Image (cartoon, rainbow, N blue to C red):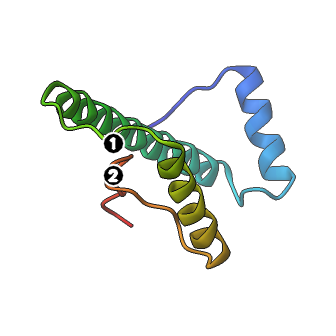
Amino acid sequence: MQIKFSDTDETFIKAQVQAGFYTNETELVHSAVRRLREEKERVTRFKTAVEKGVQEVKQGKTTPYTPDLMEEIVQTAIQKAENGEPYYSANAIPKNPKS
């Protein structure tokens, strides 16, 4: 596969390689495509979570917001951050299946 870039993009790519961020142009393109694919996967997971939430609201499956609930969420997040653990909630964005 051959790809033709605009002069601006080609200059940018070469500058990134010359600056040592990538060993060659191919590595930069692979990185960019991987990031694009990962972002699309995150968007898909987000949309799935939103749809799940919409369906649960329609079914009456809700949890009332209270200051105590918010404090519990904050404290859990702080504790996980202090332990170097990622915060995860099945009620929020689902885990990346690759994680």
Nearer the observer, disc 2 or disc 1?
2
The residue under the point 63% across, 65% down is: 78
Q: Residue furthest bottom?
A: 83
Residues at marks 2 and 1 touching, judged by CB atoms closer than 8 Å: yes
The tag earlier along the polypeptide, 2 or 1, is 1
Q: How many marks?
A: 2
For the residue pair 22 and 91, the one nearer the viewer reads as 91
Q: Residue 66 appears at what percent x and percent y? A: 47, 41
The quadrant where residue 95 appears: bottom left
Report the quarter where the N terminus lies: top left
Q: Is residue 7 left or right of residue 68?
A: right
At label 2, which amino acid type do we have?
Pro
Which type of secondary structure does the marked residue at label 2 adopt? loop
Badge 2 local density, few (<14 within 10 Å), some, or many (20+)?
A: some
What's the distance in space between the residues labelled 2 and 1, CA to CA? 6 Å
Report the quarter where the C terminus lies: bottom left
Which type of secondary structure does the marked residue at label 1 adopt? helix
Q: Residue 50 appears at what percent x and percent y? A: 32, 32
Q: Is residue 2 left or right of residue 16?
A: left
Provide the residue designation for mark 1.
45
Residue 43 against residue 83 in the figure, above or below: above
Provide the residue designation for mark 2.
94
Q: Residue 73 appears at what percent x and percent y? A: 51, 55
